[in-house]
Amino acid sequence: MLNRRILRIKAFKVLYSYAENPDLSLKEALDSLETSSEATRDLYLYMMAVIPALTAEAARRIEAARGKFNPTEEDLHPNLRFVQNGISALLEQDPDFARLLEKKKFSWAQNDAILHNLYETLRTRKYYQAYMAAPQTSLEADAALWKHVFEEEFEDNEELAAILEDSSIHWADDLPYALGCCIRSLEEMGKTGRWNFPPLYQSEILEAQGKQVDDDRKFVRALLSAAYGRFPEYNSLIAGAVSKWDRDRLYTTDIVLIAMGLAEAETFPEIPVRVTINEYVEISKYYSTPKSRIFVNGLLDRLIKEKEAAGAIAKSGKGLI
């Protein structure tokens, strides 16, 4: 589930916490990394749970309309396509899904207001109206509808953002990634008719496919451990590489990003330097200042070259590419 980009981001956030709080031990840092990683999969599970919850909301609305004092013909004979969608049924009938929700104590019951508003919004969407009007349906069509919902209704939803912020300190930043994982699950469900709880690390998925890959958990733990252990050294190296005037203007985020890049370049000889630099430049676009991209790219490139010249960084295998 978690790829190396998001694992680098998680390690970066933990190292930033260490930079701000030097009393943070390595064990605490690694524990925080594990918690953050699990939180992303928890968020994926929580968002998948909105499918049966929103379906149940629609069913409640239909039953309420039928019970009106003077129901219309539409109230008495509603279009049941959405409330009978196969994706919701698959999840509701899956014992592993139910067990995980119970174990995590995840429920949308206390957030009925957002379900009400989401259903009202959904009914106005052209993709929903086209789905409801289609002459025939299928599991793939049901999955396609939910893909639209996950693509269009959640990422900029202020109600959802408030709920996630109250639920976990990790969830707000991880929402786009978790939604992407939900969409991939929906695509698979539409094809196979099954839901599978995704492994935590992408390397586990690739290994299950018979591919020889490095362990992502070992990678990110080794990366954070190296960056943590050498952070004072990297901090001094970065400060010494800029002028006194620039030193006073250094952002902690940039220092941490460059330290992460140096740790990765030194620790993993099989990862090409350009890959490492590109990764931390990309992360800087989201977590630092508008000018950080140029600064991180330039200084990280320079410091890596200096370490290569000194023999502190030696690439091998794929790292030579």
Image (spheres, helix red, strand yellow):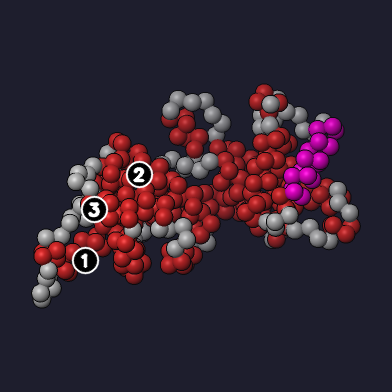
Mark 1–mark 2 Cα distance, whole angstroms, equals 25 Å
Is residue 11 highlighted in magenta?
A: no
| Above/below status of 284 relative to 188 | below
Which residue is denoted by mark 2 in the rendering? 186
Mark 2–mark 3 Cα distance, whole angstroms, equals 19 Å
Mark 2 crowdedness (10 Å alpha carbons): few <14, some 14-19, many ≥20? many
Q: Nearer the viewer, mark 1 or mark 3?
A: 3
> At which x and y percent is residue 191?
31, 36
**Closer-to-camera residue (74/299):** 74
Residue 148: which numbered mark, if any? Answer: none
Is residue 314 left or right of 179 when viewed as pictured? Answer: right
**Circle 3: residue type:** Met
Give the residues in magenta: 294-310
**Closer-to-camera residue (125/87):** 125
Mark 3 crowdedness (10 Å alpha carbons): few <14, some 14-19, many ≥20? some
Is residue 181 left or right of 51 when viewed as pictured? Answer: right
Instruction: Work out whether mark 1 precedes mark 2 in sequence or the reverse, and give the earlier one.
Output: 1
**Circle 1: residue type:** Arg
Q: Secondary structure at mark 3?
A: helix
Mark 1 crowdedness (10 Å alpha carbons): few <14, some 14-19, many ≥20? some
Res 174 seen here: yes
Report the residue at 29% width, 41% height from top. 140
Instruction: Work out whether mark 2 precedes mark 3 in sequence or the reverse, and give the earlier one.
Output: 3
Report the residue at 36% width, 41% height from top. 187
Is residue 18 left or right of 247 when viewed as pictured? Answer: left
Which residue is denoted by mark 3 in the rendering? 132
Residue 61: which numbered mark, if any? Answer: 1
> At which x and y percent is residue 279?
65, 42
> At which x and y percent is residue 34?
54, 49
Instruction: Work out whether mark 1 precedes mark 3 in sequence or the reverse, and give the earlier one.
Output: 1
